[in-house]
Image (tube, rainbow, N blue to C red):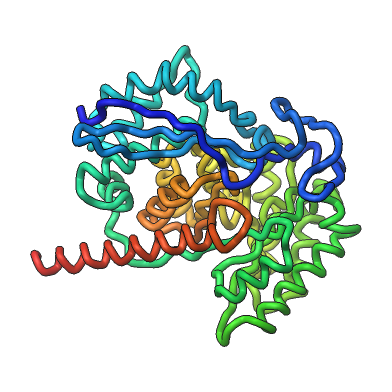
Amino acid sequence: MQIKDVLLALGNGAFFYDDQAAIRAGAIQDGFSYLGEPITPGFTSIRVPANSLSIGLVLTDDTVVWGDMMNVQYSGAGGRDPLFDTKQISNLTSRVVAPRLLDVDASHYLEACAKVFEPYEHKWLPLAIEYGVSQALLRAAAHLCRGTMAEVVCAEFDLALPTRRVPIYCQSGDARELNVDKMILKAVDVLPHGLINSRQKFGVNGQTFMEFVKWVATRTRQIGCRGYHPVLHFDVYGWIGQEFGLKPQSIADFICKVADTVPGFTLNIEAPADFGSTQAQIENYAKIVSILDKRGSRARIVVDERCNTLEDIRHFAEAKAAHLVQIKTPDVGSLADTARAVLICKENKVGAYVGGSCTETDLSAQASVHVSVATQADMMLAKPGMGVDEAFSIVGNEQNRLLAMLNRRRTQNEIIG
């Protein structure tokens, strides 16, 4: 067996874990912190520095390959796993996961993941463990076959070597105007996220949000290079539903109104409403999608909350309950399931967006790039963090390096063939 030891190392995520319930309830921002008491279980304050746990697999040639475990920014919200508990995750990894890793064939990626992630005590492992360990196993398989992580994914899922670059989507955080300018100057494909996560940012009847959308479109024309025409993507954290009520018709009417203010742009609206459960979300999002399609709107619905696991994604895709599904990698768990999720979306002719969280790390972001490119997702998130420059560099450079290597591999194969 190729794994002879397992290492654990404490780490930092690139942003913070935030109590979404407390923020939605009106917590006041004080500088970078929030005032008030947390609401979501596990939070000791509304904003908590993100932590992570690295797992290193020591291979028989003494190479060490790593993966990083963490949860998403809004942990414990929308059906997600609770706040990341380093002590609990470390204990479970040492006690349950490490012995399994010493007993698998790391050169067979899907098989290794299936064995390591079997239930323990009639429960599934936390998704953060699946996420970090699956990264390390993917790097191990790539090392053992002397290839890239993308090639491992292609081989395991019987996919052709990819040729197309995957568009990159950046998120602004609260430094909206400054970071939008950065994105435009760097000609980012999809922007700006906007972090519209409070009543103050959304405004009465959505007026503040609409003004921001118009400003972003105008700004792309003012300082963007000739021919630059990005997709505009805004995450509204359910505020359309909170402001206008949980009626698909009212939500669709507002979205069409927003789209009409930026003619010529494709407009992605992420998380327009939270209907309280996965089934209600599927039924009502499907209605919103249908209304927008019948009107021929350039607006697209992106699902995030209540669509967490691989099975959730399958149900949303089959029901056409979104134009684009965010495959939020730490919430999905194993990167093998992220690959499966992209392929499920493609089978159902629904867009696949390989996302994730600002709380992630450089290692998890780079591994996500390989899965995104291998499966030819429709877009992928620049991560980790909220600073734009760092995340765009990490994801963009990894993609460019990968495509250069795959190009060389393709050329070699053609010469041999």
Q: Quadrant of residue 213?
A: bottom right
Residue farthest toward the right in the current orientation of the protein: 204
Q: Position of residue 54 (x, y in %)?
A: 45, 35
Q: Foreground: 379 or 171? A: 171
Q: Foreground: 170 or 120? A: 170
Q: Which image quadrant: the N terminus?
A: top left
Is 236 drawn above or below residue 19 in the view shown? below
Name the residue at 20% across, 32% down.
60
Is 247 drawn above or below residue 87 in the view shown? below
Q: Position of residue 8 (x, y in %)?
A: 42, 29
Q: Which image quadrant: the C terminus?
A: bottom left
Q: Foreground: 76 or 10? A: 10
Left or right: 99 in relation to 89: left
Is 48 drawn above or below residue 88 in the view shown? below
Q: Foreground: 203 or 159? A: 203
Q: Can residue 15 be seen by looking at this rendering? A: yes
Name the residue at 53% across, 47% down.
327
Left or right: 241 in relation to 410: right
Q: Position of residue 206 (x, y in %)?
A: 85, 60
Q: Can residue 347 be seen by looking at this rendering? A: no
Name the residue at 43% across, 37% down.
334
Left or right: 102 in relation to 334: left
